[in-house]
Image (spheres, grey):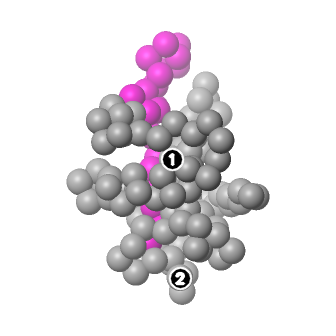
Amino acid sequence: MTRKLQASSANPAALRTPDFEIDVFDVGRDLFAVMDLHVAYSGCFDVTALRTEAAWLANLQFAGNMPADPVGGCDEYFVIARSGSEIAAYARATRFHGIPMVMEYGYAPRIAPRCWLYFVI
């Protein structure tokens, strides 16, 4: 399987395509759909840590928070791509020692041939 990710400096509202709309992750609205997507996407790789709901909530609390970093922690940037009302893809990014990094992403296997994630760092 080949993973593809494209970063863009455009604003998320301007990234609507005929197939996808970019939105910011909301735990109350999106958590269970992202959990299902994570299992479907990551479950096809060896040595994947599949999270319970409690593990997801804990991970969301410390993601991007690096108190040992002398410059200080930073917020995580978590975006989703919707296809209609369904979440088709997600990406989680943060700065690690000042360097922007995608920490995790996933997409629905059925949309892989046409899925490109755009996000702002």
Which kind of residue does numbered mark 1 sit on?
A: Arg
Q: Residues within 10 Å of mark 1 (few under 14, many from 20)?
A: some
Report whether 52 appears left or right of 18.
left
* Looking at the image, residue 109 lies above or below residue 68: below
Q: Earlier in the sequence, mark 2 or mark 1?
A: 2
Q: Which mark is residue 19?
A: 2
Between residue 74 and residue 79, name the one nearer to us: 79
Q: Which mark is residue 113?
A: none
* Looking at the image, residue 78 lies above or below residue 30: above
Whether residue 53 appears in this view of the structure is yes
Q: Residue at x 56, y 56 (%)?
A: 41
Residue bearing mark 1: 92
Local secondary structure at mark 2:
loop
Residue 8's x, y, as percent?
64, 61
Q: Residues within 10 Å of mark 2 (few under 14, many from 20)?
A: few
Residue numbers of the magenta segment: 62-82
Instruction: For marks 2 and 1, give the CA distance.
Output: 21 Å
Which kind of residue does numbered mark 2 sit on?
A: Asp
